[in-house]
Each structure stands twice: as C-alpha cells, then as structure tokens.
Image (spheres, rainbow, N blue to C red):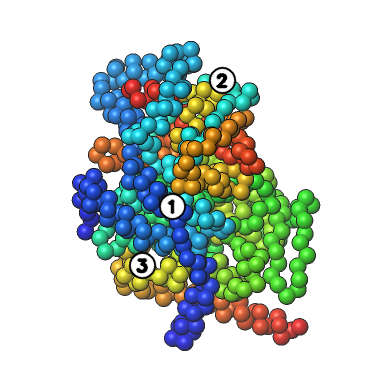
C-alpha cells in the first residue's frame, strides 16, 4: 500500500527514508557495478545519490514491503541516463576507448568468458531477469513486483530465460570442444 | 532444464557476479542525504507558478506577457534585470533556495573562484525553455515502435502498459520498451530477440581503420578489442534510423564514422539529439550490434514539449552562477574530481581555487519540475557547460542560462 503523500513533510518520513537509504545503498551500488563499466567509487556514489534522490521525490509512491525491487526499477532508469552521459564523455575523450560493456583485460583472465558471452547473446529482457535473480538476489515475489507481473509469470519468465541462456551456453561450448578436437 | 544443470548454471552465475566480494562504502552518505531530503526545486517551482499564471490568464493577456518576455529576451544585457550576476550567485547559494534534481555533486562555489576567460562571448544566446505539455499517447508510442518493426517486417504480438512503461513485443520475440517512469525525458529501447533470425542485420566483418593499432593477441586468450571504421553497408542501415528524428521531436539524426566505432565483431554508434540546433544533454540515439545483428537501440523522446521564451544570460555573464547547479556525469577527462565529491570538501579554511573558464557550450538540459500538486513535469532548460583547468584536470562546470533573477521575480 502506498504511503500518504503528506508523509513527505514529516520528520518520521525523513527518518524512515534515511534508514532505508542506508540499507539500500549497497544494493544499488552492486546493481550499478554489475551493469556499467568502468565505474570509479565516485561514479558509484553519484549514481546511488541520483537514485536516492528519485526515491525520496517519490517516497510516497514506494510500495510498502516491496521497496527493494521498486528501487531497483528506479536504478534501471538512472542507469539508462548514465549510459548515455557516459557514452558522450567517452566519445569526447577518445575514439579508442574500451567497450563500456566489455570485460577489462585483467578480468578476462579469471572470468567465465563463455558465460559472459552467453549473457551478452541472450535478449536484454532475459539478461535482466537472470541477473536480477542471480546477482541482485531478487526472489520470485520481488521479481514480480519489479516487472509488475504475477509471481507465476515471473517464475515462467525466469525459467525460460535460464533455458535460453543454458542453450546458448551449451551450443557455444560444443563449438569450442569441436574446435579443440580439430586441432 | 534438469535440476543439476540448473544448479550448475546458478553456481556459474554466482561466481561470475562482477560485484562479488566488494564491500560498498559511500564516501559520505550522510551529507548526500542532507542534500536529498532538502530537495526543493525552487527555481522550477517559480517557473511553474509563472506558467500556471499564464495558463489561467485570458488569451490576450498571455499574448502580451509572451511578447514582453520575447522583448526582454531580445533586449540583451542592457536591461537592468540582467545586471544582477553577482547578486544572483548569492541568492542561488543561500540556504532555502536549493536547486532540485541532479544537484548532488556539490562543487560548492565557495571552494572555487570562477572567472570568465577573454574568449567567452557576451552575446545573449537565443534559446527557449521547453516544458512538457502532453503525455505521450499510445498511438505515438506505437508509431515509434513501428520504426523498428518496419525495419524487420515483424508484427506486434502483445502490448502492455504499467507504471508509465509500455512494452511492445513482436511475433519474433523482439521487444520495444517506452518509459516515462522516474526520468526527466521519456526513454525508449528496442531489443531484438537474440535467438531469432530477425533483428536489424548489419554486415560483418568491419573494415579496419588504419589509424588504430592492432594489439597482438596471444593464441590462448580472447582477442582484445580493436576499434575500426564501420562499413558503408553498416552506415546505410544506421541512416535508416534517421526517420526516428521526426517522431521523437529532434532535429535530423546523422550517424557518421565520427560517432561510430567497430571491431571485428561489434558496432557501437551514437548520435546526439538536438532541438532547435542545440544538443539535448543525455539525449542520444545509441545503437549496438554484435556479430552482425543489432543488440539494442535506445534513445530519448522529447515530443510534446512547448517552447517559452525567457531572458537568457550570455556565457560571460552567467559565469557568476557557475557552481550553483550541475547536471552531473561530466567532470572532464578521467571523470573524477575527488575534490568535488560530496562531503570531501567541507572546509573553507583554504583559499578558493581559481578557475578560468575558457570555453562554453549551450545545452538543453532535462530537468524534472514538481508542481504544487506533486505532478512531475519534464522540462528542458538552456544551460552553459563551461570548461576550465583546475590543477591538472580539466573540469566541466554548469550554470542554467535562464536569468535566475527574472525567474525569482515572476
């Protein structure tokens, strides 16, 4: 149930928001780190700040009990704006800038490259629900709130996304095995 | 999927979490929250009040008022109302008159002394303040989505709207999302279904760009990205997206090799959206393609805006207002000025750092205004982006180009 808009001016609302901000900030930081590269600590702070500002401006709209998935929805939009701003900055700095969505060279050494490539290959919708579940830790109920769908629909959507990811992953690994065998 | 393979996939996903093992500590959350909860977009509220007064007045009165504003705008800095640069800087910095969204990065003017360089123009620019007057209609969203559908000859299989976000799914699994939720400008994105054969085909491989360096790649590691020039065929596909311009309310979009880059497997292209010849901050059309197929197209929609003529400040005169406001994400090369980060500059015991601003660009900057009834209104405000050297880094600094003295008195 949405809180009353009149709450915003109350100290109680401000206190509640401050307490929520402290708990949600690390979740937001993780959300941004997983989706935007490269990010300095200051960049993360700023994205968290901007997200918290929108949450505060819409504090009366935040659904009680579903604050986390709702806030990650705000973060998704903040991220979209940041990507566009970052692209402009990158374009101005150098045409030889690294792919902001790619892996850093040092990461490639230790990362599960096949999985990373499979995640890139699935649709944006599939990737988002997989990552929200596996990395951001949203439950089925929270995914349902985040996407504004029923829990049954969230279960089906996640399952299908996993299946498609697995299919791409297995296909790529079969190709890799075949190449290895031919050498 | 079998349970064992599912568990294995979950384990691999968990192990690949880019944020795993990172403990987040905000540099100064307390200070940031102080700024956030004090959010009162005063200048915008004044402007909204002015707009409401305009809306409620008789049509003839509106014409007179608008004409008067236009006259003020064209009169330039000779009018007394535009000669309050120093006073307005004080006003904007005063407690209780805080700018709203995106003012979190506090490079407080008390820590810097900004001076206009000789190259800054004193010419008063010509630009309008834009406010959103109508919500995007379902028909408009469908028209926008059809731009992509036409490229792929797909048909819509479903369409849903919730929380100011509309999602259109095509028969082949491609999807189009349009959202006006929690953003200053509505955004849209098109995501082809990666597992389908459809999508917007872009030929690969790319031609190499002789200006770039080929990085030797060991045989046992993945290749390092080497950027090249898109082919003519790719540019032709991108040019077809120019038709979007008329639908999203911007000037014609132009992809060139200057704003596109390609490797042997991927293509990234972007074009800055402009309105009346001015770039709109953060509004770009972005295209990404991997292995010959577009993986995403995204951008902003600025239709439904109406222009209001306001008196503006020249680049030279507006320097006094620098530091009062920032649209964020643009602090120069490296992107980080630690001295500017929230909370890390709290002392005034040291002398302000002198910064000579030597160039300026006028932007239209998205900003959300909040009316007295709590309704969010998208606006585009003319703002100067200045560039200046601070120690060893080049910073960008911002000031709204709308005369704040005029806003506060109307």
Q: CA distance from mark 3 to mark 1?
A: 30 Å
Q: Chain of mark 2?
A: B
Query: B132 or B367, which lies in front?
Result: B367
Secondary structure category for the residue under label 3: helix
- Badges 1 and 2, same chain: yes
Tell me if label 1 and label 2 are in contact, CB under 8 Å. Answer: no
Cα distance in 3D space between marks 1 and 2: 39 Å
Q: How far across and down, in percent of the image, does residue B4 sit?
A: 47, 87
Q: Which residue is mark 2?
A: B122
Helix, strand or loop under label 1:
loop
Q: Earlier in the sequence, mark 1 or mark 2?
A: 1
- Pointer 1 local density, CA inside 10 Å: few below 14, some 14–19, many at least 20: few
Q: Residues within 10 Å of mark 2 (few under 14, many from 20)?
A: some
Q: Quadrant of the C terminus of chain A?
A: bottom right
Pick the residue in front: B175 or B114: B114
**Which residue is the site of mark 1?**
B28
At 69% across and 70% down in the image, what residue appears?
Answer: B222
User: In the figure, residue B163 lies in which quadrant?
Assistant: bottom left
Reply above or below: B88 against B297: above
Residue B148 in the image: x percent, y percent?
50, 53
Which residue: 55% across, 23% down?
A: B316
Q: Dot 3 falls on which chain?
A: A
Give the residue number, with chain letter if any, for mark 3.
Answer: A143
* Co-location on one chain, circles 3 and 1: no
Q: Position of residue B341 (x, y in %)?
A: 50, 47
Q: Secondary structure at mark 2?
A: loop
Q: Quadrant of residue B66?
A: top left
Inter-mark Cα distance, 3 to 2: 54 Å
Q: On the picture, is B279 further left or further right than B393?
A: left
Q: Residue furthest front?
A: B349
| Circle nearer the viewer, 3 or 2 | 2
Q: Residue, x 46% and y 82% (percent of image)? A: B6
């Amino acid at each position: 149930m949405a809180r009353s808009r009149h709450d915003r001016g109350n100290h109680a609302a401000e206190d509640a928001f401050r307490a929520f901000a402290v708990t949600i900030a690390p979740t937001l930081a993780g959300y941004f780190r997983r989706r935007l590269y490269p990010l300095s600590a200051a960049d993360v702070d700023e994205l968290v700040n901007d997200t918290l500002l929108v949450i505060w401006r819409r504090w009366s709209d935040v659904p009680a009990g579903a604050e986390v998935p709702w806030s990650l929805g705000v973060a998704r939009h903040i991220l979209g704006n940041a990507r566009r701003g970052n692209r402009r900055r990158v374009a101005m700095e150098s045409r030889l800038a690294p792919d902001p969505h790619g892996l850093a060279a040092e990461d490639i050494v230790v990362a599960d490259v096949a999985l990373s490539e499979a995640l890139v290959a699935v649709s944006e919708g599939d990737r988002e629900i997989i990552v929200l579940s596996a990395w951001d830790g949203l439950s089925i109920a929270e995914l349902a709130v985040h996407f504004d769908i029923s829990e049954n629909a969230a279960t089906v959507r996640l399952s299908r996304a996993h299946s498609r990811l697995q299919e791409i992953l297995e296909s790529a690994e079969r190709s890799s095995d075949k190449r290895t065998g031919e050498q | 999927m079998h349970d064992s393979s599912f568990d294995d996939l979950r384990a691999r996903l968990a192990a690949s979490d880019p944020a795993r093992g990172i403990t987040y500590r905000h540099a100064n959350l307390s200070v940031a929250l102080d700024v956030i909860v004090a959010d009162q977009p005063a200048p915008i509220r004044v402007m909204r009040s002015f707009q409401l007064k305009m809306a409620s007045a008789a049509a003839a009165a509106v014409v007179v008022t608008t004409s008067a504003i236009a006259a003020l705008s064209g009169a330039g800095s000779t009018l007394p109302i535009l000669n309050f640069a120093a006073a307005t800087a004080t006003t904007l910095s005063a407690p209780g008159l805080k700018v709203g969204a995106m003012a979190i990065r506090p490079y407080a003017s008390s820590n810097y002394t900004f001076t206009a360089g000789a190259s800054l123009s004193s010419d008063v620019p010509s630009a309008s303040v834009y406010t959103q007057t109508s919500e995007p209609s379902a028909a408009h969203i469908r028209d926008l989505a059809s731009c992509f559908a036409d490229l792929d000859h797909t048909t819509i299989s479903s369409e849903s709207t919730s929380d100011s976000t509309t999602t259109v799914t095509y028969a082949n699994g491609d999807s189009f999302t349009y959202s006006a939720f929690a953003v200053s400008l509505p955004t849209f994105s098109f995501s082809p279904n990666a597992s389908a054969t459809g999508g917007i085909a872009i030929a690969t491989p790319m031609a190499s760009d002789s200006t770039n360096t080929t990085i030797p790649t060991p045989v046992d590691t993945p290749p390092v990205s080497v950027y090249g020039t898109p082919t003519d065929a790719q540019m032709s596909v991108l040019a077809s997206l120019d038709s979007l311009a008329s639908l999203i309310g911007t000037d014609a979009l132009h992809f060139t090799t200057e704003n596109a880059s390609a490797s042997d497997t991927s293509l990234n292209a972007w074009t800055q959206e402009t309105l009346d010849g001015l770039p709109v901050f953060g509004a770009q059309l972005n295209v990404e393609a991997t292995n010959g197929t577009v993986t995403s197209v995204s951008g902003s929609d600025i239709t439904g805006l109406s222009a209001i003529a306001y008196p503006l400040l020249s680049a030279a005169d507006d320097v006094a207002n620098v530091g009062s406001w920032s649209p964020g994400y643009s602090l120069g090369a490296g992107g980080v000025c630690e001295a500017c980060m929230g909370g890390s500059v709290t002392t005034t015991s040291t002398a302000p750092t002198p910064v000579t601003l030597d160039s300026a660009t006028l932007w239209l900057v998205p900003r959300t205004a909040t009316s007295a009834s709590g309704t969010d209104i998208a606006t585009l405000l003319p703002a100067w982006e200045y560039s200046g050297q601070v120690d060893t880094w080049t910073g960008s600094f911002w000031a709204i180009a709308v005369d704040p003295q005029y806003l506060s008195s109307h």
